[in-house]
Amino acid sequence: MCEVVPINGSAPAYFYHMTRVILKEAVHMGFDEDTALRLFVQTMKGSAEMLLNSGMSAEMLEDKLRLKGGTTLAALDKMDELGFDRCLTEGIKACVSRCKELGNL
């Protein structure tokens, strides 16, 4: 069950954290927080619908947005450079590890 926790139990916090970061940057760029929140939440909702209903994998959907020379690619390349995947992977491992520690108490 500990392996389920980061994928299901703790995952909402990951989305909330990402939302906080994106909202902070949106406000810094001049958006009001409510507008930025609505835009981002609708984007998350639409992305989830695509994952569930398009018949395409997450990798396929991402690849469709990785346009050479485009803005999305620039963002994803920077995230790769800064270790976004490693950050998520290590966070998931830490969650599982802590769950197992708590299970031994």
Image (cartoon, rainbow, N blue to C red):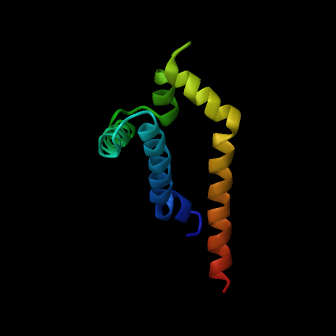
Location of residue 69 in the rendering, given as x and y in whole percent from the top left corner = 56, 13
**Residue nearer the viewer, 29 or 68:** 29
**Residue nearer the viewer, 51 or 91:** 91
Location of residue 1 in the rendering, given as x and y in whole percent from the top left corner = 55, 70
Left or right of residue 16: residue 37: left
Q: Quick check: 83 above or below 65?
A: below
Q: Quick check: 58 above or below 33?
A: above
Q: Residue at the location (32% across, 38% down)? A: 39
Location of residue 104 in the rendering, given as x and y in whole percent from the top left corner = 67, 83
Left or right of residue 97: residue 56: left
Q: Where the C terminus falls, by quadrant?
A: bottom right
Q: Residue at the location (63% across, 79% down)? A: 102
**Residue nearer the viewer, 49 or 1:** 49
Location of residue 97 in the rendering, given as x and y in whole percent from the top left corner = 68, 68
Left or right of residue 16: residue 33: left
Q: Quadrant of residue 79?
A: top right
**Residue nearer the viewer, 61 or 73:** 73
Q: Quick check: 17 above or below 24?
A: below
Q: Residue at the location (68% across, 54% down)? A: 90
Q: Residue at the location (51% across, 20% down)? A: 71
- Extreme residue toward the top, this view: 69
